[in-house]
Image (spheres, helix red, strand yellow):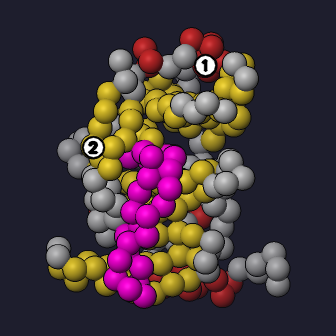
Amino acid sequence: MRKMWVVCLLLGMLLLPAMSTAETDVPHEVRQLLGEVEVLSAAGWEEAEQSTWFVYARTQDGTGTLCCFVDKNGAWAEEFRTQKAVPPGNGRTELHISDGAWSFRDPGNGKGQYIEGPILILLQYDADNTAVEWLISFARSQAGVWELIAVRKYSCSAIIDVGSGGMTFYSMADKAQSVAVGCAPCCFDRDLRSFCLTDVPLTFQAAQEKAFSTVLPWQ
């Protein structure tokens, strides 16, 4: 049975209803398409026109893989598999899907921007499974593409919102107030199908250096 979660996207998004599920809830056809893997977490989003299931699985060689499956007109098909979007840690990894999320804060007016869902949320805990280490979020665009919107790495206080206009970096001067450190161009592919987590600079300084050293496609 699908469990309802209230996921607090720490230092970045408000309390929102989100859905996570066990392997037993994964559609039978999807489980067959997965093949010989161990399902560690899964989350589904059901709509009249198209349903989507994300599955985080471990292959026989121990590699973590994020898989996406889509049901169009009653037939399930694999959309893509990726290992590049998954953090390299050994902590527990969970998938959640929410119907919306708030961005960290708009540096212009001090208020967050509400982002319409569905939102895919990938959480990875630390090695002891006691605290969230990574939070990575993707929103589905009107074109049906899952695009990166947020990255948090809590051990190094990386708080980054990502959008079409670039990346905004934040710091916590104290637990009650955030400060926008600066904005930088987004010099990597946000599309989940080809997104690579190691391409994301985790500090504003690193983002500036990468922007100056990267030749963008339109230049």
Q: Nearer the viewer, residue 81 or 6?
A: 6
Badge 1 element: helix
Residue 160 percent location from the top left of the image: 44, 70
Magenta region: 98-124
Residue 159 percent location from the top left of the image: 38, 70
Residue 18 percent location from the top left of the image: 37, 41
Q: Would residue 162 appear left or right of 109 to someone viewing this image?
A: right
Foreground mark, 2 or 1, reads 2
Q: Amino acid at mark 2?
A: Val
Label 1 CA crowd tier, 10 Å (few <14, some 14–19, many 20+): many
Q: Is residue 115 shown in magenta? A: yes
Q: Amino acid at mark 1?
A: Val
Mark positioned earlier in the residue sequence (2 or 1)? 2
Q: Nearer the viewer, residue 118 or 89?
A: 118
> The N terminus lies in which quarter of the figure?
top left
Q: Tell me the CA gap for discs 2 and 1.
A: 26 Å
Label 2 CA crowd tier, 10 Å (few <14, some 14–19, many 20+): few
Badge 2 element: strand
Residue indicated by mark 1: 30
Residue 131 percent location from the top left of the image: 23, 49
Rendered view: 62 above or below 93: above
Residue at image coords 32%, 27%: 3
Rendered view: 179 above or below 44: below
Residue indicated by mark 2: 6
Residue at image coords 32%, 79%: 171
Q: Nearer the viewer, residue 63 or 208?
A: 208
When asked about the image quadrant of residue 75, the answer is: top right
Q: Is residue 122 visible?
A: no
Residue at image coords 66%, 33%: 49
Q: Which mark is residue 93?
A: none
